C-alpha cells in the first residue's frame, strides 16, 4: 500500500482545533513546526511607535502527517473543516508521495512504521 505525506500550513490559533479534529477522526501522529511565510497576501503594514513597517513573513504552523493513501481524503477534509476561517491567509494543504517510511527502533517499514 502506498504512503502519502499531507503538509498543511495553517494559522497558529487553529492548531489545537485541527489536532483535536484529526484525533477524533482516528488520525494520529504528526509533526508540527512553527514557520513564517506569505502567499498572495504578501504580508501587511503595521505602525509601531509612530513608524510604519512591513511585516513580510507571517507566523504560521506547518503540520506534517504521513499516512496510508486511503486515509488522505479524510485527513484533508478534516483539516479543511477545522482550519478554515474564510479569511485571507487560511493556508494551504499539500499532498505528496512518500517512497518509504522506516521506524528506527524496530526497523519496521511502510505502513507498519507509521
Image (cartoon, rainbow, N blue to C red):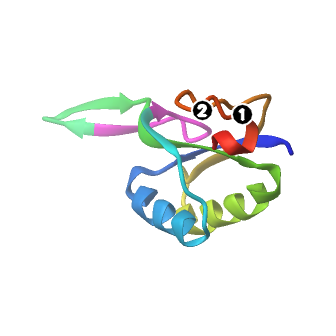
Q: Residues within 10 Å of mark 2 (few under 14, many from 20)?
A: few
Q: Can the viewer see residue 85 in this picture?
A: no
Please report the bounds of the magenta region as a residue range: 36-46
Indicate the secondary structure of the residue bearing disc 1.
loop
Give the number of the disc on residue 103.
2
At 61% from the left and 70% from the top, the residue drawn is 25
Mark 1 or mark 2, earlier in chain: 2
Residue 55 colored magenta?
no
Q: Which residue appears farthest toward the bottom when viewing the image?
A: 24
Residue 45 colored magenta?
yes
Q: Against 55, is 14 above or below?
A: below
Residue 6, horizontal then vertical, whole percent: 68, 45
At 73% from the left and 64% from the top, the residue drawn is 74
The reply to whether dot 1 and dot 2 touch (C-beta < 8 Å) is yes
Quarter of the rendering occupied by the N terminus: top right
- Quadrant of res 47: top left
- Please give left or right for residue 75 compared with residue 20 in the image: right
Residue 43, horizontal then vertical, whole percent: 46, 36
- Seen from the viewer's position, the closer of residues 46 and 28 is 28
Residue 109, horizontal then vertical, whole percent: 71, 33
Amino acid at each position: 500500500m502506498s504512503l502519502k505525506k499531507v503538509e498543511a500550513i495553517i494559522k497558529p490559533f487553529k492548531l489545537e482545533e485541527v489536532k483535536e479534529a484529526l484525533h477524533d477522526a482516528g488520525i494520529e501522529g504528526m509533526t508540527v513546526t512553527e514557520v513564517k511565510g506569505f502567499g498572495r497576501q504578501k504580508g501587511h503594514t503595521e505602525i509601531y511607535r509612530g513608524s510604519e513597517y512591513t511585516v513580510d513573513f507571517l507566523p504560521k504552523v506547518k503540520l506534517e502527517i504521513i499516512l496510508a493513501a486511503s486515509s488522505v481524503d479524510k485527513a484533508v477534509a478534516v483539516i479543511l473543516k477545522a482550519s478554515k476561517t474564510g479569511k485571507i491567509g487560511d493556508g494551504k494543504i499539500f499532498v505528496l508521495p512518500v517512497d518509504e517510511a522506516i521506524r528506527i527502533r524496530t526497523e519496521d517499514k511502510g505502513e507498519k512504521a507509521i
